[in-house]
Image (cartoon, grey):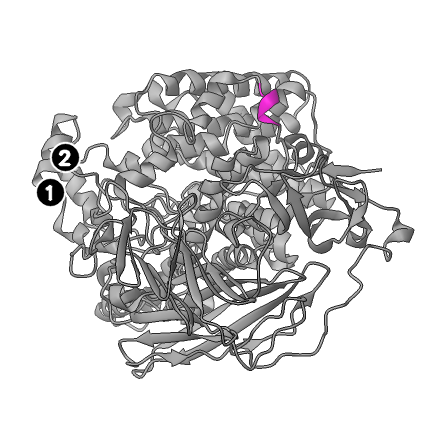
Amino acid sequence: MLSCPLRFLPPREAPVRRGEPVTVGLPWPRGAVTDDRCFRLIGPGGTEEALQTQLLDRWPDGSVRWCLFDFRATVGVKNGGYRIEVAAADRAENRTTPTKPWPVEKNDDIDYRFAKSNDGSPPDIHGGGCFELGTENNGDAVQIPFNADTGTAGAIHRQFRVVWGGRTTNGQRLQGFGRIRWFRDVPVTQFDFTIQNPQPAGHPGGNWDLGQSEGIDVTKLVSRHVPALSSLPATVRVSCAPGSEWTNAGCVELSQVSSGGANWDSTNHLDRHHHVSLAARGYRVTADGRSIEGDRATPIVLLESGEKFLGVAMPHFWENFPKTITADKDGITLHLFPKDAGPHELQGGEQKTHTFYVAFGKDTITDEPMAWCRSPLVCHADPEWYENSGAIPYLTPKATDPNAEYMKLVDQAIEGPDTFFDKREKIDEYGWRHFGDVYGDHEAVYWPGPEPMVSHYNNQYDCVAGFLYQFMRNPDQRWWELAIPCADHTCDIDVYHTDGDKAAYNRGLFWHTYHYAPADTGTHRSYPKSLRKGPPESLTKKMDQLGATAEKLKKSYAVGGGPGAGHNYNHGLMLAYFLTGNPLYKETAVDLAQFVINMEDPSKTPFRFLSREYTGLATESGGGGYHGPGRASGNSVNALLVGHQLSGEKKYLDKAEEIIRRVSHPKQNLDSLDLLNAELRWFYTMFLQSLGRYLDYKIDLGELDETYAYARLTLLYFARWMVARERPILDTPDKLQYPTETWAAQDMRKVEVFQFAAKHAEGKEKEQFLERAEWFFRYVEKKLHEFPTKSLCRPVVLVLNFGWSRAWWMTHPDASAPFPNVAVSPDHCGEWRMFVPQKVKAIRRAKMIVAVGGIVGLAGIITFIIWLMYF
């Protein structure tokens, strides 16, 4: 019988948990399970316990690839453990369920006015609390009515998805959505609440600063909870942080006004006026007139009267400052956007998600009520389970990886003097807009200022995926604490949540802060207007001393732009969805796949009247009209494959295949593409990596068709050329503007390309590809260790994502891929020509039309008008 043992990360506090609701996503081998109703939860006593399942992903043969499991776990008080077993198909209907089913009546227009009973029955929606919202444009706070679906009900919880929308008094739209989960037989409700400004942002000159008119100033957003208390006097109890003593009072106010860290007043917190307006370090508590101060609060606030009970707790409270929680005999209010710390500018296309818990009865899961809500249990499988499932190709446990020097490079993220947690502290990467991002310290190497230069990494090279790969190889709490906040930040802040801008930007991912430039008031949106002023004189002098010209640096500052195909990463969000079941991750990942299709749509541009050709925005890399293999095409193919896997919609796979044929060919003149020019073309290996993943994906689908054959021929053609021509980029440092450690890390991509090629080769050629993979792997290991800057953000993220597959190939050198079902040779593939996008064709046709009409001078005017319309 197939059985998956379940493990738990050690809780940060309260190690004894009794019946805590737990959610975990697990992968399953192909063909092993056909129906998620076959799963059974076996508890520490060896008996079957209640289990709720949700199918997340299927293998192409219809069997379960990823499934979400909800159950109640008791840890720290019983021997043994939990496991998921697969019962015979004829027992699919006989899973253990509670004797009392959930009522299934529809709840329309839930306005979050409810009190939850202790016996797990549905909420009374006629009283209990409400959300209130205030903006600068509508003055006083207004209550927010929700519309809710009928939800999903199971053995462990009942979940509703809620949505709301409205306009400020000046007509700006503001909307929100979220999940409410009521746990059976647990008097605690979980809220995931997202507030979103769907307006397109103003970005004059291609810059994206705070203070644009499309932003909405939220003056307050509160969640108000009113208890149904007895006539006895009510007592407020508050615990400020794990391990702190409880304080009793008649009324309490706790405000986290800054992170409480050493750099709490960092320039990371600039507002639109270039001010850091944080009031003080840490948090302040007022309890019946008494004052308490501290650095970092993760409070639990309880209101008790006899047997009546109300409680509120919020994980990552201080990390998402400012936050305030108040309580008195009339109730508890959680201030998600506190009025006293406002206004809180929600930029156009920006959103923020808050997660918190409310208890409507005495919680006994932990000895201290609601202590588990500060750090819920994280459940996972053994690394060997993730490996043997095959759901993550080439994944192996860290414990069996023989590449010790490579693992030292990886573990810099969580161990040593410069971890990613240390990087957070350097620029105080905290606050509701910043928490979860990674400090791009590699961009600050040349910064001359006394304080750190603020630079945000915005999930570049897919930090989320890198963290989660390493978590599955070595389930360490620290990987999880990096991955999930990073996924949340990517969904909320890094993605442009609007449909009102041009198709080239809508729902795209903002890339990292521009090279060697402070984020300033551009926050996480790549291009602040301060770039227009050029670099500080002190910076240009320092660059001159290092051999770079100040003129080049000045030119690099005079830029603007927005989201683009070259910086579009969604694979990590898909992994996060599979491991947690959070629908926001799936929705955002699919949005980023649709972004590729939308930006290519010729009907969405002013040029549509002169050309129906694709725009080419999904494939142009490095400028200059280059549509060969590159960063944009590689990331576009990867994003589309994720879109296809998550949605099943054929349009995503079709577009990926169209892009592959557009930019690559098994008879391209590779020398003419100037691929060895590292400054301009280093990223061609990114495309070849995506080509290898595409081939693996087609094998999984069982589609060994003509496009599979075309891609296979192309990969082998490029790999042969690389064997003859490719060398480490740093072998010619004089050809690089900045010969940094990142170039060594980028060479790890060549390892993957050669491994993919070896899978499709035979005989001596296969051996040659594997030899090159091994050679480049050892080179990167050695070269990176020579750099004192090897712990900077960018090289570490690169080794988190690439290199871990080497261990698998060392034990599977004979792995091979199936041949195509159709015979295709390079000579049958026609000739390859550089793609000509819509804009170029449209301008040519405009000139031709005017020239034929004899009005040559007008051609320039028409061209100029079209150019203005587009840009």
Q: Is residue 94 left or right of residue 550?
A: right
In this view, 56 is above or below 869: above
Amino acid type of disc 1? Pro
Would you say 862 lies left or right of 666 here? left
Q: Is residue 288 left or right of residue 543?
A: right
Residue at 30 percent across and 81 percent down: it is: 140
Residue 41: horizontal and vertical position, in percent?
76, 47
Indicate the secondary structure of the residue bearing disc 2.
loop
Which residue occupies the foreground of this view, 207 or 190?
190
Q: Nearer the viewer, residue 424 or 326?
A: 326
Q: Residue at x 63, y 66 (%)?
A: 118
Q: What label does residue 593 carry, if any?
A: none
Residue sitting farthest toward the front: 232
Magenta segment: does it hold 398?
yes
Q: Is residue 204 visible?
A: yes
Report x, y in % for residue 636: 49, 49
Tags 2 and 1 touching, CB below 8 Å? yes
Amino acid type shown at disc 2: Pro
Seen from the viewer's position, the closer of residues 321 and 781 is: 321
Secondary element at image label 1:
loop
Q: Which residue is mark 2?
A: 448
Q: Which residues are magenta?
A: 397-401
Query: Where is residue 253, by image quadrant?
Result: bottom left
302 on left or right of 451: right
Q: Main secondary structure of the magenta part?
A: helix
First reached walking from the N terminus: tag 2 or tag 1: 2
Q: Position of residue 392 (x, y in %)?
A: 63, 38
Q: Looking at the picture, how far across and down is residue 721, in whole percent? A: 50, 25
Tag 1 residue = 536
* Quadrant where the N terminus is found in the figure: top right
Residue 657 in view, yes or no: no
